[in-house]
Amino acid sequence: MSRLQTLFSSPKEKVIPFITAGYPHIDSTVDLALACAEAGADMIEIGIPFSDPLADGPVIQSSSQKALENGITVEKILQQVRKIRNSTDVPLVLMGYINPIFRLDCELFIDYCREVGVDGLIIPDLPFHEAGNFCELAKARDVSPILLVAPNTPGEQIKTISELSQELIYAVSILGITGNDLASKEALTEYLQRVRNYSITPFIVGFGIKSRDDVTWFNQFSDGAVVGSAIIERINGSASPETEVKVFIKMLKGE
């Protein structure tokens, strides 16, 4: 089984931190990811900075802009992932936008991902009806394409998206950008139950998850909670980002 299949074969609660590659410093990625792993992160999502991040809220947008100013590139991120993989077996997923991948060449990018130990790819601006070729390229190289569903995604479309992904999908908790406030628990419950009913794969939930209570609640209805903006906020201005991340993830895990 792949690392993702192994992780999601267990029903345990899962905390999935998001960090922006190249932030706060260009060489921060490796140390922050390993700090996440040491704190007990079940999977680590690493953001590929992009100048026009449509799905990201102001906190992650700001971190991406700073990372780009620091000189981070897709090639450097893949080199950093190799270093992370050499030190941990925690599943690693890259989240990025399709334009930088197109510029590098999709097939070459996915080849590099496999080589350095990337387990999955989340591409928020890749519509599922245009994702078939990308997904097949990724799956042929044992890199999991993790497609997104949203509260307005019809049930049968959720099923189709999960079939195309095969291993894991990402349920966006809100219609909007990262860091926004969550909808009512009643609406979220109905939505997540619909995802569970139609998806043939496990699914994780992200956007707006900030606290231990959020992590506990979302894990009741899904297979894992992604925490992004709240982690970047903790890193901002910290004298010791790695220590801050460790403490916060342990809190999110209830330790």
Image: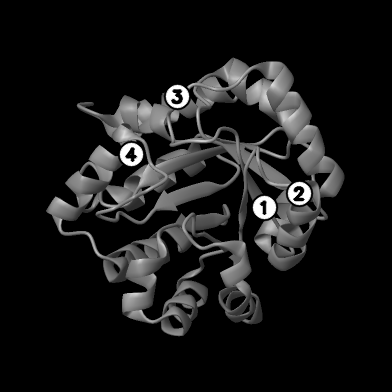
> In which quadrant is the C terminus drawn?
top right
| Secondary element at tag 1 | strand
Q: Which residue is mark 4?
A: 60
Q: Which residue is mark 2?
A: 202
Give the quarter of the figure containing the N terminus: bottom right
Q: Secondary structure at mark 2?
A: loop
Residue drawn at x 50%, y 43% as measured from the top left: 37
Please tell me the numbered disc located at residue 4. none
Q: Are marks 1 and 3 in contact (CB under 8 Å)?
A: no
- Closer to the camera, 187 or 251? 187
Q: Amino acid at mark 3?
A: Phe
Q: Indicate which label's residue lies in the foreground, 1 or 3.
A: 1
User: Are the residues tagged 4 and 2 within 8 Å (C-beta)?
Assistant: no
**Is 151 placed above or below 250 here?**
below
CA gap, disc 1 and disc 3: 25 Å
| The image quarter in which residue 135 lies | bottom right
| Cα distance between the residues tagged 3 and 4 | 17 Å
For mark 1, what is the residue?
A: 169
| Amino acid type at image mark 1 | Ile
Mark 1 or 3, nearer chain start: 1
